Image: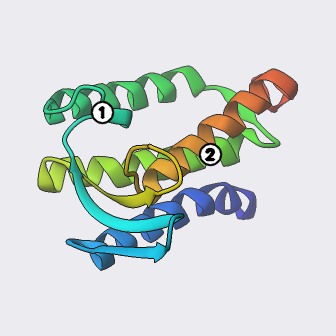
Amino acid sequence: MKRALLWIFPGVFILIADRIMKMATDGADFVLMDGVLAIRSAQNTGAAMGLLTGNTYLVLILSLLLIGAAIWLLRGMKLSGMAPLSLSLIAGGALGNIIDRVAYGYVMDMIEVLFIDFYIFNLADVGVVCGVALCAFSLLFRPQDWRKT
């Protein structure tokens, strides 16, 4: 049980931090570090990096289908090492954005990197990206973390 809580905590942390940041920065528009980082409230009706813009419900359905497929594929797996952490981060971030899509019809984004031309994003996106990176690393270099029972 204690180990399961350790695996769940990172995703719950991302989810709660994302919700708090979205509430605190709704409608905000200010520079945190000149030339580096700004907070700019934005509404994303698509998926990552402008994909499927304006198709909120299609993105929501695809997200839910992907979560269902992941649960189905992971059934009967004994996860160890980085695998649970990576999945926890992905789940926490995905849930943060799904809550927005259901509640508002769009995802609230607010973090803008100023020194490169990049999309505005949120903490849930950071959780998903970090989780996917850890997952890829684990699958490539630690396949023993993903065992069938």
Tell me where residue 98 appears, x and y as whole percent. Answer: 29, 47
Tell me where residue 14 appears, x and y as whole percent. Answer: 51, 61
Above-or-below relation of 45 to 142? below
Give the residue displayed 17% in from the left and 49% down from the top: 102
Colouring of the image: rainbow
Q: Which mark is residue 50?
A: 1
Above-or-below relation of 146 to 6? above
Tell me where residue 3 appears, x and y as whole percent. Answer: 74, 58
Give the residue displayed 58% in from the left and 49% down from the top: 88
Q: Give the camera-side residue of 140 and 4.
A: 140
Give the residue displayed 61% in from the left and 35% down from the top: 132
Badge 1 density bin: few <14, some 14–19, many ≥20, Cα 10 Å: few
- Amino acid type at circle 1 is Gly
Q: Locate the C terminus and report the quarter of the image it occupies.
A: top right
- Amino acid type at circle 2 is Cys
Above-or-below relation of 76 to 82? above
Q: Mark 2 and mark 1 in contact (Cβ < 8 Å)?
A: no
The CA distance from mark 1 to mark 2 is 19 Å
Give the residue displayed 44% in from the left and 61% down from the top: 15
Q: Is disc 2 placed on a helix, strand or loop? A: helix
Residue behind mark 2: 130
Q: Give the camera-side residue of 36 and 41.
A: 36
